[in-house]
Image (cartoon, rainbow, N blue to C red):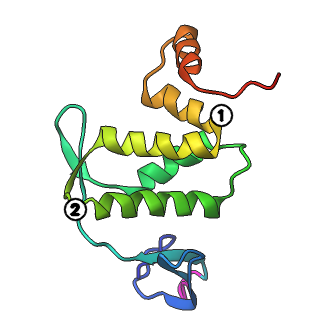
Amino acid sequence: MRCPFCGHDDTQVKDSRPTEDNSAIRRRRSCPECGSRFTTFERVQIRDLVVIKKDGGRSPFDRDKVLKSLRIALRKRPVDDEQIERIVNGIHRRLESMGENEVPSKFIGELVMEVLMDLDKVAYVRYASVYRNFREAKDFEDFLGKMVVPRLD
């Protein structure tokens, strides 16, 4: 595998182990050319998923986009990276198990919203504000008004 730091073609695997949820193999690699170390993940890919965007365009599913959006929504929240990885793996598996090669972006967004609603309400609202394109404070107010939050009296 090519070194991401110097571009050398021949790196060495120093350690290899399954991830916590056994959905991937984590490999620590070292570059003999520049001495840098980096991590790669090997995952099973059942099918090539294509995302159908709002404008009708199509692009390959990119799990890293889901990962990045979750990390942004969960920034400074009590959720660790391992848990975020498991969430992304779960979403990816769910999409693959649908049996469809093409998935609307709206469906992916709703899956993420569903997971965040159960996991962390603050992250849920953060994600919703971008996903649903909130433009003003009233949008937040309307959205929060629709959330069912138990009252502590």
Residue for badge 2: 99
User: Callout 2, which amino acid?
Assistant: Gly
The answer to whether marks 2 and 1 mark residues whose Cβ atoms lie closer than 8 Å is no
In the visual, does 88 lie left or right of 107? Answer: right
SS of the residue at dot 1?
helix
For the C terminus, give its image quadrant.
top right
Q: Residues within 10 Å of mark 1 (few under 14, many from 20)?
A: some
Label ID, residue 45 = none
Q: Main secondary structure of the magenta part?
A: loop
Image x and y of residue 66, in percent: 44, 50
| Residue that appears at 57% across and 80% down | 34
- Residue at point 58%, 11% (across, down): 137
Name the residue that disc number 1 marks: 122
Q: Which residues are magenta?
A: 29-34
- Image quadrant in which you'd find residue 61: bottom left
Earlier-in-chain disc, 2 versus 1: 2
Q: Label 1 amino acid?
A: Val
Q: Is residue 37 left or right of residue 68?
A: right
22 with respect to 78 (left or right): left
Q: Position of residue 100 (x, y in %)?
A: 20, 57
93 is higher (above) or lower (below) than 44: above
34 above or below 115?
Answer: below
Residue 107, x across and y down, in percent: 32, 42
Q: Is residue 87 left or right of residue 9?
A: right
